[in-house]
Amino acid sequence: MAKWQDRTALMLGKEGLEKLAKAHVLVIGLGGVGAYAAEQLCRAGIGQLTIVDGDVVEETNRNRQLPALASNEGESKAKILGKRFLDINPDLKIKVINEYLKDERMVEILNESAYDYVVDAIDTLTPKVFLISHSLQLKLPIVSSMGAGGKFDPSQVQSCDISKSYNCRLAKMIRKRLHKLGIREGIKVVFSPEEVDPIRVRIEESRNKKSAVGTISYMPPVFGCYCASVVIQDLLRKTID
């Protein structure tokens, strides 16, 4: 055990650390939620990470996203985080995929390895539904982040099966699309039922989106940390070869 893992060992014991060290987690989407989820997995001692995002750091990311600094605007989020995670755990096995995943390519990535868990932190609807449905088809455990935008109260964030989520517009749209595919349950989600004040939403056409939603610095990280906790707790309950 490396010295930097001493406090984690006090929490989990040697067996727990060994389970996490054997695990391979796929994180797709490295924005406000996904980057924090991936970092907490790295710091907890997950032995292998595959991280995926084709986006670059923009000035508007700085209020909430882990890799976003004035000094690295225009640089790949995935590459920044890959380097950062190796600085946390030099023994980490990490694969960095600097791409936007669609359809066949997403299926290819899902089939590339025997992942122990998938974290869905995609913020656009169609690829999100595609990832969830194909992860289920491949019997890959998945936790999916719902909308953190417009939310303000971290005490309302919770995790449940998607069938029990409520008062979240993104979750509602995803449930509707999944129902058309014959999927009604079996996906863990992190969501908040907090009402979104319409004043926090601005109509604004951009790539893949028709509106901009206000965000406060701590909410996407809270969602990301919650996603990481779901993964870690589930992994500690199972046997990993």
Image (cartoon, rainbow, N blue to C red):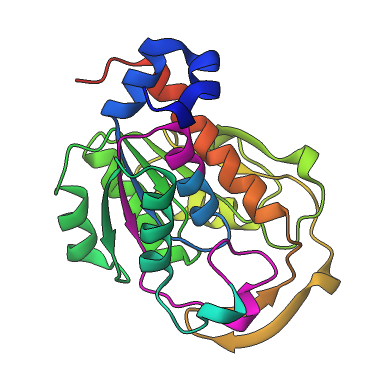
Residue 81 pos. (x, y %): 42, 60
**Residue at x-position 67% and y-position 51%:** 168
Closest to the observer, 31 or 72: 72
Rendering coords of residue 144 (x, y %): 48, 46
- State yes or no: residue 10 in magenta: no
Does the rendering let one see residue 181?
Answer: no
Total labels drawn = 0
Q: Residue at x 73, y 61 (%)?
A: 217
Q: Magenta residues, as a range?
A: 40-68
Rendered residue at 21%/39% (across/down): 138
Closer-to-camera residue (89/82):
89
For the C terminus, the image quarter is: top left
Image quadrant in which the N terminus is located: top left
Q: Nearer the viewer, residue 78 or 187?
A: 78
Q: Is residue 176 above or below residue 56?
A: above
Q: Residue furthest front?
A: 3
x%, y% of residue 237? Answer: 40, 15
Quadrant in the rendering for residue 128: bottom left
As drawn, is 70 to the left or to the right of 156?
left
Q: Residue at x 56, y 80 (%)?
A: 71
**Is 119 placed above or below 12 here?**
below
Residue 55 inside the magenta-drawn segment: yes
Out of 233 and 150, give the one closest to the viewer: 233
Measured as percent of width and height from the top left, residue 116 is found at: 28, 32
